[in-house]
Amino acid sequence: MGFREDFVWGAATAAYQIEGAAFQDGRGYSVWDMLCRKQGAIWNAQTGDVACDHYNRFEGDVELMHQLGLGAYRFSISWSRVLPQGWGEVNEKGISFYDRLVDQLLAKNITPWATLFHWDYPYALYKKGSWLNPDSPKWFADYAAMMTDVLSDRVQHWMTFNEPQVFIQMGYGDGVHAPGDKLGFRELLQVSHNVLLSHGHAVQAIRAGAKLPPQVGFAWQSAPTVPASEDEDDIALAREANFVVKNRNMWSTSWFADPIFFKQYPEEGVALYGADMPHIGPDDFDIIGQPVDFFGINIYFGNTVRAGADGKPEDVPYGLGQPRTTFDWPIVEDTLRWGPYFMWERYKVPVYVTENGMANIDIVTPDGRVHDPQRIEYTRRYLNALKRASDDGADIRGYFHWSLMDNFEWAEGFKQRFGLIYVDYTTQQRILKDAAYWYRDVIKANGNNLE
């Protein structure tokens, strides 16, 4: 069986990680501009000021996408590039960039998938309280409405947020990502509630203003728990582990997805968080629970569980010599089988893998090429696992490789290379890696050449 005939093959990026042009053409400051100037915050004090200079080189980059045979490209919009203060005055040069990018994609028969928020929050709104401000859902809805008005005559696929678990926990809880805050848990829960309200308002805004019928969803982070065997007890324990809320942190899929699909928070989480729970207005869940068309999920690694002798869950440790990426993330390919399957099984909407890939040691060899057999093998294993989920009956609609090109990897600076395309950050030369040519062939064969 395998992948459906209309399976979407794509690659993904994020604005701050590739665009550069941080101070060009009226772009406003973002919280990542702020954090990159904090001593010790970013590896080797690097910044995304220039990054891949995609803002000035997008036409060539789209041509490379075309050479790869991509059917879709997932990009994010820099909120402060189009609205320098986060609201109010529009930056027409910023709008023009995304206008031209979308036109260029369509000219190459590449379907644009737009993400409204991939972590680069406007600095001007951060000074007004950021996601803690009760007006933050309105700010986001206004931004969503504006971009819908500008692009929805050509863009039909929209994602509201990328990985709220990550930017809330790491940016507002741990202080490792922008804006670098270390809030209390009550405040984190309020941030998460306001983000979910922002999502709901944005979905309403997109549907109200779309000029072409929209497909609206989101991209959530997940490190799935997979069963150690095909035994039904192991599978049941893994299923439960993926959705139970048992820790006082943001690393939960169901805490963010249940309110959208079931119009309520998970009961065990409400009990665990007790007095720290945010204020929930009478209409909040009706706003949050706007119907969505798909579930986007970003998966890189995960954990394994089995039934112990007493039938209770038992974590299975990684084996000696467990393969790992240069980010020290364990390679657990079955996460792309069970993660999407469990999500589809619980929420009953089509699933797209909106990010998956690996950081690798990539160097240009004397033949002028970048040979990355590890990335090819990683992706082959994960895609075969995804095919298994599809064979098992899950409605899997597409796969976006992370990332299209090497880029600014947040607090890691330029240390980690995830791209299908190698970027020399000094010269801005682009080189298609071996994995890019391999992925092109996978796309041509619709994944039927993976075994």
Image (cartoon, rainbow, N blue to C red):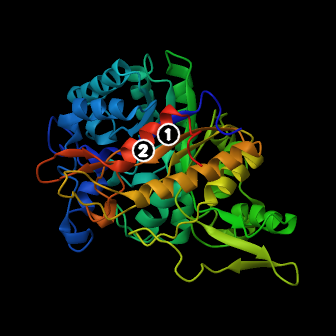
Mark yes or no: residue 124 visible.
Answer: no
Residue 143 in the image: above or below residue 344: above
| Left/right of residue 124 with respect to residue 2 in the rendered view | left
Disc 1 vs disc 2: Cβ atoms closer than 8 Å?
yes
Q: Position of residue 165 (x, y in %)?
A: 53, 59
The amino acid beneath tag 2 is Trp
Q: Position of residue 101 (x, y in %)?
A: 30, 27
Q: Which residue is located at x 19 percent, y 35 percent?
A: 57
**Residues at marks 1 and 2, CA–CA distance in whole angstroms:** 6 Å
Mark number displayed over residue 438: 2
Local SS, label 2: helix
Residue 357 in the image: above or below residue 235: above
Residue 282: quadrant of the picture: top right
Local SS, label 1: helix
Q: Which residue is located at x 53 percent, y 66 percent?
A: 331
Mark number displayed over residue 442: 1
